Amino acid sequence: GSSDPRLKFTVSHGGKEQIKPFQTRSEPATLNPSWKEQFVKPLTVEDANGSASLFVQCEDADALSSNDPMGSVTIDLWPLRETGAVVQKSYTLEGDGAEGSVELL
């Protein structure tokens, strides 16, 4: 089988969820998508108020029905404040029926 995967990103900081999530375009008919898209969300230590995380949700984008979840992962961004380094890392998707991982830079 194949899917039309899409990633949706939500930033939470200081106990508040970002109002508008970012999302990639869907990749038609594949189980091995590759997105080369960039999203920028400026976040200061003051805004974060002691915490910041990125929630990444992978879903099968369906035009005629509701999107089907394919897994998700929550990434703690707070430790990155100390170095400000750019990190490339693979994160395993979790949840019912989740398979695979997402690699983020």
Image: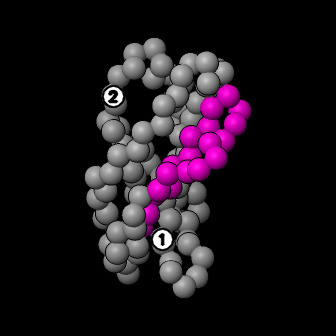
Of 88 and 12, the residue lying toward us: 12
State yes or no: residue 81 in magenta.
no
- In the rendered structure, which amino acid carries the disc numbered 1? Asp
Q: Amino acid at mark 2?
A: Val
Give the residue at mark 2. 86
Residue 26 in the image: x percent, y percent?
A: 40, 67
Q: Which residues are magenta?
A: 5-23
Who is closer to the viewer here, 73 or 54?
A: 54
Quadrant of the rendering where the C terminus is positioned: top left
Residue 94 in view here: no
Within the image, what quadrant is residue 50 found in? top right
- What residue would you read off at disc 1? 60
Look at the image and tell me in which quarter the N terminus lies. Answer: bottom left
Which numbered disc, 2 or 1, marks the residue that appears first in the sequence? 1
Q: How many circles with numbers are drawn on the protein? A: 2
Question: Is residue 101 something that shows in the picture?
Answer: yes
**Cα distance between the residues tagged 2 and 1:** 28 Å
Q: Is residue 59 left or right of residue 5?
A: right
